[in-house]
Amino acid sequence: MPVVKLVLEYDGTRYVGWQVQPNGPSIQAEVERALATLHKEPRRVTAAGRTDAGVHARGQVVSFPEARPLPLSAYVKGMNALLPDDVAVRTASVEPDGFDARRSARGKRYRYVVENLETRAPLSRLQAWQLFGALDVGAMRAAARHLLGRQDFAAFQASDCACEHAVREVHRLDVLGEAGGRVELVVEATAFVKHMVRNFVGTLVEVGKGRRSPDSIPALVESRDRTRAGRTAPPQGLFLDEVFY
């Protein structure tokens, strides 16, 4: 059966996350509601990743099997007319039988935005972590190099993560920008454990503040001890940029 693939962009500020939950609005519910209106019957979608409350996406991917796909314009223009202003379909395509947004993915890229400011900036507070006092971005870059490659990242795994293990392969971890401005951390990996990127960021920010040395990172990874890593960075700075297939 053909599979419809949608690439979504959304502002996650007012949502409890991607997944349908009883305690508030979810992006999944909005997408499935729009699809049900288009098809005049319910549709369930699979997402490449379940973003948390407050997390945004530029390239979230969802898929669902469809015996008779609608014209692609219906999935873009039609759904965008039905979706709220903070959720949009960027592109739509029909993929071969067996395509699955989650299981077919070969990797993802996340971007985390830090604004290194002298004082708070109200207009960007929901799409960046605002930090005051100059960060040592060079030290953050040096520390980030120790997080590349295939390693056990249990030290950066949320305590309630359901994954069987935390071995992941990080292909890219760039720290872009300079102190006193916008600093972006770009992470690409085959897969991620829960809160892995946000825990990377929280730890690298501690390096940037001089609270830990870049050379301490290998021992931290080796410890597999979450309590030794930095705080979990707040959700509003995180964006799911792209899913690779």
Image: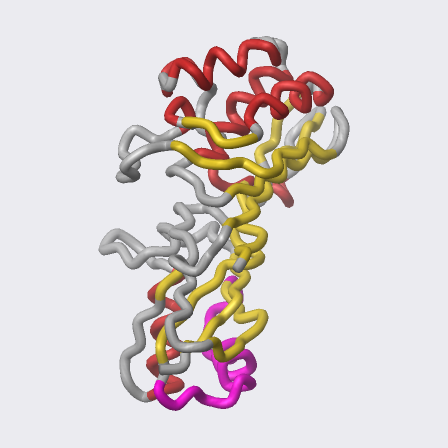
Q: Quadrant of the N terminus?
A: bottom left
| 116 versus 30 height, above or below | above
According to the image, what is the colour scheme of the structure? secondary structure
Q: Between residue 235 and residue 101, name the one nearer to us.
A: 101
The residue drawn where x is 53% and y is 54% is 57
Side of 175 where 80 appears, left or right? left
Residue 4 visible to an observer of this rendering: yes
Q: Residue at x 39, y 90 (%)?
A: 68
Q: Residue 141's image quarter?
A: top right
Judge from the rendering whether residue 182 lies leftward or rightward of residue 166; answer left or right.
Answer: right
In screen coordinates, is 92 left or right of 192? right
Task: Give the image location of residue 241, x and y in percent.
Answer: 58, 52
Horizontally, residue 91 falls left or right of residue 133, namely: left
Q: Is residue 223 magenta?
A: no
Q: Position of residue 12 (x, y in %)?
A: 47, 52
In this orientation, which residue lies closer to the viewer: 153 or 49?
A: 153
Q: Is residue 113 visible?
A: no
Range drawn in magenta:
67-86
Q: Nearer the viewer, residue 29 or 201?
A: 201
User: In percent of the image, x 37 and y 26: which residue is there?
Assistant: 154
Q: Residue furthest left?
A: 22
Residue shown at 63%/43% (left/top)? 124
- Estimate the x, y position of residue 163 in percent, counting from the top left: 30, 39
